[in-house]
Image (spheres, coloured by chain):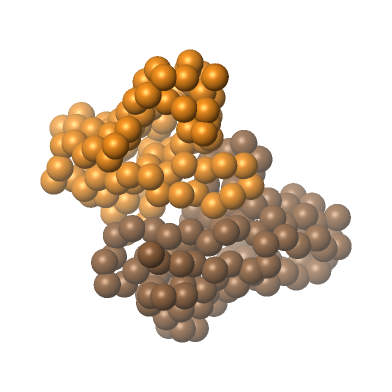
Chain colours: A brown, B orange
Amino acid sequence: GAVVSQHPSRVICKSGTSVKIECRSLDFQATTMFWYRQFPKQSLMLMATSNEGSKATYEQGVEKDKFLINHASLTLSTLTVTSAHPEDSSFYICSARNSATNEKLFFGSGTQLSVL
Amino acid sequence: GENVEQHPSTLSVQEGDSAVIKCTYSDSASNYFPWYKQELGKRPQLIIDIRSNVGEKKDQRIAVTLNKTAKHFSLHITETQPEDSAVYFCAASIHDMRFGAGTRLTVKP
């Protein structure tokens, strides 16, 4: 089956620092990857759509300068939380769609970010 | 954009009983409807999905029904077991995927 790898699984950082999260599709190519944020006991909220070779598409209310997305290859997308603050603490999870089937989404294992 | 609503938010059933979770969506162009099961702190796991050209799909104890006209779809779990306890999310997709608010299912032994 399709595997999406996400690292790191857990990050604790000081306020003001930047954190990079990687999302890789291991056995398929993904022209599109999606970044979600999930607060405790809430649903997955789409933050942005990451498009290989082009700019990401951000959802309303998500600051593109704060959440930098890079999708430089067909198997890797990164999310950088810049100048993180305690309110950015959340579970961040990526997903990827197989470019060949263009339907099912496969999720990474998620990154629990805690900003002190 | 697409808006997905999910009910109930919590559901408690006795082991062996059936559980039904319902979702509605707003965008008639949505054509793919997956259901995910998520355990605490883990990634969502796809448990069943249905395309817009199909009305019903079954996989062992799990079934999904879709009513395109009414724009709603439901998850049915029969003969529930304690290990079915988790949070279940419905989703609707055209290009990106939008999730419902989730249903916390508790199966009491």
Residue A94 coordinates in the image, percent (x, y): 52, 61
Q: Residue at x 68, y 67 (%)?
A: A8
Q: In the rendered view, would you say B27 is above or below B62?
A: below
B23 to the left or right of B13: left
Residue A47 coordinates in the image, percent (x, y): 53, 57
Q: Residue at x 47, y 42 (%)?
A: B37
Residue closer to the observer: B26 or B23: B23
Is residue A55 visible in the rendered image? The answer is: no
Residue closer to the observer: B94 or B14: B14
Image quarter (top left, top right, bottom left or bottom right) of the C terminus of chain A? bottom right
Q: In the rendered view, would you say A16 is above or below B68?
A: below
Residue A21 coordinates in the image, percent (x, y): 64, 69
Choose top left, top right, bottom left or bottom right for residue B58.
top left
Q: Residue at x 54, y 68 (%)?
A: A5
Residue A26 coordinates in the image, percent (x, y): 47, 75
Image quarter (top left, top right, bottom left or bottom right) of the N terminus of chain A? bottom left
Give the mark count. Answer: 0
Q: In the rendered view, would you say B94 is above or below A21?
A: above
